[in-house]
Image (cartoon, rainbow, N blue to C red):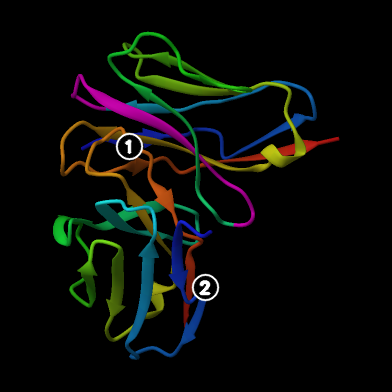
Amino acid sequence: AQTVTQSQPEMSVQEAETVTLSCTYDTSESDYYLFWYKQPPSRQMILVIRQEAYKQQNATENRFSVNFQKAAKSFSLKISDSQLGDAAMYFCAYRRTGTASKLTFGTGTRLQVTL
Amino acid sequence: DTAVSQTPKYLVTQMGNDKSIKCEQNLGHDTMYWYKQDSKKFLKIMFSYNNKELIINETVPNRFSPKSPDKAHLNLHINSLELGDSAVYFCASSQDVGAGNEQFFGPGTRLTVL
């Protein structure tokens, strides 16, 4: 079974600084997708960034980028120039390719942004 | 315009009651999902439907019954509610069953069973 591990229950970053959230996963599949979702206090789940496993280039979306290390099964999220609005729970998620595959989430990292 | 909507947002009920949560998406998506988020924020898939057909059914008690009258709606009915059913339930949708598709989530329904 696939598992997703987020070893940092809480992280804190100062406004305008950079923070990296860790995620590792376990799978025997070679083709899959990895995601980071954000859940602010409003409870709404929002996709931050996604990565396809066969693409070696790390995905970037504005201030958000990932460090995807397929051999190490690691998928960390880097947030640059942190803003107060980045404060949220961040969930790493995995989904293998296939029509009946499910999205498997990690336990989440709560990010605090301080002034 | 709300993409994925759920009603109600909050639901407080007694043990043993039966309740339903409704979900609607106006994105024209083919695939819809129900997730449960427990008190520790752990999020887990319950069901997935594609074009009104059940494609994922996790190990969920059969007191939980999803119903998809059309591909824009996926409702969740829960019989004989138990204390352990207290959680936030999220509905989501995606364009189709493609694994790389973004899933769009509703605002969640916080269910409290007393």
Dot 2, how many residues are within 10 Å of its Cα: few (below 14), some (14-19), or many (20+)?
A: some
Residue at screen point 50% across, 49% down: A45
Q: Is residue A60 left or right of residue A106?
A: right
Q: Is residue B64 left or right of residue A4?
A: left
Q: Earlier in the sequence, mark 2 or mark 1?
A: 2
Q: x and y percent of residue B90 in the render?
A: 41, 60
Q: Which residue is mark 1?
A: B101
Q: Is residue B40 above or below residue B69?
A: above
Residue at screen point 32% across, 88% down: B18
Stretch in magenta: A27-42
Residue type at numbered disc 1? Asn
Q: x and y percent of residue A25 in the render?
A: 34, 28
Q: Which residue is mark 2?
A: B9
Q: Chain of mark 1?
A: B
Asked whether residue B90 is in view, the answer is yes
Q: How far is disc 2 from disc 1 in space, using C-alphas? A: 26 Å
Between residue B41 and residue B48, name the one nearer to us. Answer: B48
Residue type at numbered disc 2? Lys
